[in-house]
Image (spheres, coloured by chain):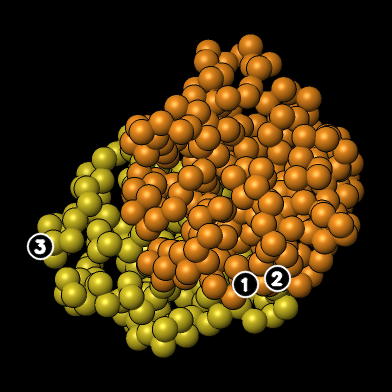
Chain colours: A orange, B yellow
Amino acid sequence: MLTKRIIPCLDIKDGRTVKGVNFVDLRDAGDPVELAAFYADAGADELVFLDISATEERRKTLAELVRRVAEKVNIPFTVGGGISSSKDVDLLLHNGADKISINSSAVKNPQLIDELVSKFGSQCIVVAIDAKKINGEWKVHLVGGKVPTEVELFQWAAEVEQRGAGEILFTSMDHDGTKNGFANEALRRLSTERNIPIIASGGAGTFQHFVDTFKEGRADAALAASVFHFREMEISELKMKLKQHDVPVRL
Amino acid sequence: MKIAIINYGAGNIQSIRFAFERLGVHPFLSDQAEEIATADLVIFPGVGEASSAMAKLKATKLDLLIPQLTQPVLGICLGMQLLCNYSQEGNTEGLGIFDTDVLRFNHGVKVPQIGWNTIDQLKSDLFNNIADKEYIYLVHSYYAPLCNETIAISDYGITYSTALRKDNFYGVQFHPEKSSAVGAKILENFINM
């Protein structure tokens, strides 16, 4: 039986992890490779690296990091952040990334999804969508959720699937950082309407939040950052709790 | 030991190389028939779309070499599918080693299947010291149905082949290079063929 995935997300700036504190057992928790290996051993099903650097050197630094991760880590990982061309994607995949995620660049140029899918295949193209509810309607936001657009979430998700993306990573800006639970109502609609896997993101705070997003939100995977980075929750314990609630997980 | 990874431009093969290096062996990448033919073991990888991958194989004439190989050959993911008779994806003629067609998932499940599933009813040395119901990582939209050459099964709306074997040819639908310790053990078993 296909299991639900738990995905820690690592924010990367200039080749280093941005968050991550309570890792006294790691020599260097700022080293994404060491942190990634830690999560892989702890039972993470997949990893996401989100690059937030803004330097000229970012492409090269990120490609080197991807290669080091691929050398060391034996679970799949996705790389996102500022990817806007098939040249960017080619470099990351050739250095060992399993999937890449695009976000703002896809909203600005939806054709990019078709182009990447035809070149690299659906299986490695994730479209990340950041959205926020404005006057009762979910609107897609750009640049890490800062810039609102007129694009409606569910229509955009339908277009993303139709253009061939293999997966959708949905972050609710209303829930992100609140630790009050995932946007399960929107997730449930996305997961029911779409026929590609949906990754839930934004709002993880307790074990119950994960149970709820898999059961009520019907998410295929759940992504979180701070609850893992600050050691508020151990992945092994989370998975035991999920299993107790009859959510299929890899143990 | 010489391990060749067939490098025909179909997807991410670095991960496979790195997985073998973690086991202490050093495969080489090649698109040269003579070089590949001299290897002790051959890895036939592949991700992406079937018809374009087959076109790339034909362009390098590797479609003629692969069926003639006599050493152990391991097809991974799309590599396994291309060793079958035919794939619905892009209406593609395969290399005809495994006597089955490859079909698109169409059983009320999300496509692609992405994530960790279990393997069961394991046969062959490839799965030495691997227990039934271990977890492996998969990303795919097309599958090989059950057939005489099935050596592992999984369920995703339907029960299908997650591994196939005929003589010296092995194929796995999952990604051993991304399947944690279980995947590493399977690759180690292949090295010990």
Three-letter amino acid code at the position of disc 2 = Gln
Residue at image mark 2: A155
Specify the farthest residue to the left: B34
Q: Which element type, helix, strand or loop, lies under badge 3?
A: helix
In the displayed structure image, the side of residue A121 where residue A17 appears, left or right: right
Q: Nearer the viewer, mark 3 or mark 1?
A: 1
Residue at position x 18%, y 61% from top? B31
Q: Which element type, helix, strand or loop, lies under badge 2?
A: helix
Q: Where does the C terminus of chain A fall, quadrant-wise?
A: top right
Where residue A149 sits, quadrant-wise, is bottom right
Chain at tag 2: A
Instruction: Estimate the x, y position of residue B6 in percent, counting from the top left.
Output: 25, 60
Instruction: Estimate the x, y position of residue B187 in percent, counting from the top left.
Output: 42, 48
Three-letter amino acid code at the position of disc 1 = Glu
Chain at tag 3: B
Nearer to us in this view, A164 or B60: A164
Residue at image mark 3: B34
Residue at position x 77%, y 34% from top? A177
Instruction: Assess whether mark 2 and mark 1 are in contact (beta carbons under 8 angstroms).
Output: yes
